[in-house]
Image (cartoon, grey):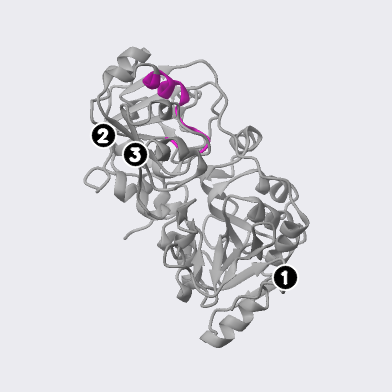
Amino acid sequence: MSVAASALDIEAQLPRPRHREGRSLTMAEALDLIPDGSRVYVAPLMAPPTTVLEAMAADADRWTALETTCDYLAEPLPTFANAGAPFRHLTVQASRALAPMAEADALGVVSACSSQLSGLYLPGGPLAVDVAIVQVSRPGPDGRFSLGVSGGTAAELVRAAPLVLAEVNPTMPYLRGVVECERSCFDGLIEVDPHPLVEFTTPPRSDATDRIGANVASQIADGAVIEYGIGAIPDASLAALGDHRDLGLHSGMLGDAVIDLVESGVMNGRGKTFDAGLLVAGMIVGTQRAAEWAAARDDVVLVASNYSHGATALARQDRFTAINSALQVALDGSIGAEVVGGRVVSGPGGQPDFAFAASAASDGVSIVALQATAARGTVSRVVPAIDSADRVTVPHYLADRVVTEHGVASVRGLGAEERAAALRAIADPDLVAG
């Protein structure tokens, strides 16, 4: 598969656009366009089209059946109040926000990593959507709109979905990259009152997360190109990088944890093989401050999912370094990050994509960091094997560095017995896995 020449090679990242009318619509006119029985993609994470979804929930009798879908949600969608009557939801990234749909038996779950999403949702895909609904900023000086914080799959679907609706939220900052859209990218635009974006805040750091972060930082070389995931441990890891030099960013997300590294000059992108000097991400995931900070910078470029998560784009970055967390790690190096005790709590997200890319990149490193115990220190997260009721998110043959507060296990190239010994050494000493 071909890959865009750079993050700024926008057309190479996106499907051929459909020409649309770009009409200004009332809310009622917009809802009239959504066919009964549709599968409706909604922008995820910080940017669900809240006002349109509230209107859909209030006027639910328009449809006998409608299925919303997206990847990660931090908050329930307004339509979840009508779970099963008529609304269902299909997710590729489980989260606590989906509990109302699960309880109503109105939730479908498909396990897919981030690099697969556009192929699933685009026309002809097994989960092809009929409608895409997104948020956009007010138009910029040149008349174009911006999807703001939502690059990745949302940017691809705006080009290709059969029907595309956008709510124009004055709160949405104008960002650059694949998120910039001509008016003709949309079938209809609905002006809405300003409303806040969904914010992601990191839980307070603990002694354990700070120790884990310091251990992660010890494994990152100067000039590394960083990818990091959502959560306290990846954030603590970035906070521990203050003494490093010439770091870069090529990640599925950019959030608050990046700001201090950039402002201090630590993350300047000078060592990147491609996109030198650019902060490249699929989307913004953080607070309003992070969104506005990113919008004010010319070096932040949002890209499509095939560029943020695609193996070809990632693996050509020398020293590509992935930092992700997990629920458990087995003694053979298998990583579980989705299911624990038979209960689905997350999805694979980009972790499999980034682990594979790190294994293929020159001097690449894949770091999986987790606290050694769960359940207030009574259960080891280093386990003899991933239980059959749970899922392996990253297979053992892609295991590289595993980090806990007790140290680092560098397992790439180790045989089974050596690998198990290295992992036991970073387990809780009172709960060493069998």
Which span of residues is magenta-colored?
Answer: 43-57
Asked whether the residues under the numbered discs 2 and 3 touch, taking CB atoms below 8 Å apart as contact, a structural biologist would say no
Give the residue at x 77% y 61%.
243
Name the residue type under label 3: Leu
Near mark 3 (Cα within 10 A), the count class, few <14, some 14-19 or many ≥20, is many
Q: Earlier in the sequence, mark 1 or mark 3?
A: 3
Across and down, in percent, residue 380 comes to 62, 67
Quadrant of image for the N terminus: bottom left
According to the picture, the residue beneath numbered tag 3 turns out to be 157
The one of 175 and 198 positioned closer to us in this rendering: 198
Across and down, in percent, residue 42 comes to 39, 34
- Between disc 2 and disc 3, the foreground one is 2
Give the residue at x 75% y 58%.
210
Mark 1 and mark 3: span between their CA atoms? 44 Å
Across and down, in percent, residue 34 comes to 27, 24
Q: Earlier in the sequence, mark 2 or mark 3?
A: 2
In the rendered image of this protein, does residue 378 appear above or below residue 285?
A: below
Name the residue type under label 2: Asp
Q: Is residue 268 visible?
A: no
Q: Which mark is residue 130?
A: 2
Name the residue type under label 1: His
According to the picture, the residue beneath numbered tag 1 turns out to be 406
The one of 379 and 352 positioned closer to us in this rendering: 379
Which quarter of the picture shows residue 201? Answer: top right
